Image: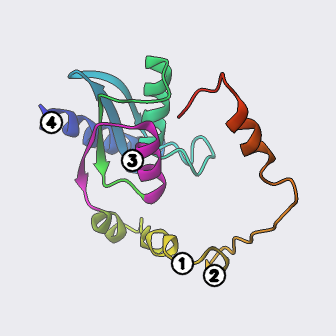
Amino acid sequence: MHETFLQQAIDLAAENAESGQGGPYGAIVVQDNRLIAASGNKVTTNIDPTAHAEVMAIRLACQELHDFQLQGCILYSSCEPCPMCLGAIYWARLEKVYFACSRHDAAAANFDDSFIYDEISVQPHQRRIAMLHLSLPNALEPFDIWAKKSDKVLY
């Protein structure tokens, strides 16, 4: 069954690439062997650098299931998820991910995200895009308010 769903993600990626609708990536979300959501990469069509196939499929699945967590769901991706998509996968709490191509296959096709993997271990102020901490007196106020809320929805 996993091969069938993964083949659907690959077919979606191929259709996406051929139609010019976005990059050569596809992803689907499945729950209890039922397709919940599917998307190709929409970075260029949506003019959105976060519109990777995995993120789009996660967004659609959350809308379909009316939940911001996808526990019990499996994501099938035509390619190993990039660092951004990996973060989204963990935040969505997917059960498992199956992928076809590796990040090295993507790099060979000029989709190399190894520099992002490398940047994660670099101190924020030393990254290629400097990330500079500014200490403001009330910086913790949003967290303090959140901590005191009795009706918060944890995620």
Say the numbered circle drawn on residue 151: none
Of labels 1 and 4, the one closer to you: 1
* Among numbered discs 4 and 3, the one appearing first in the sequence: 4
Alpha carbon separation for disc pair 1 and 4: 36 Å
Seen at 41% across and 57% down, the residue is 82
The amino acid pointed to by label 2 is Gln
Write down the residue under mark 4. Answer: 2
- Please tell me whether residue 61 is drawn above or below residue 27 in the rendered image: above
Alpha carbon separation for disc pair 2 and 1: 6 Å
Q: Quadrant of the N terminus?
A: top left
The amino acid pointed to by label 1 is Val
In the drawing, does residue 132 fall left or right of residue 137? Answer: left
Seen at 37% across and 48% down, the residue is 25
Write down the residue under mark 3. Answer: 17
Alpha carbon separation for disc pair 4 and 2: 42 Å
Q: Which segment did they paint magenta?
A: 83-102
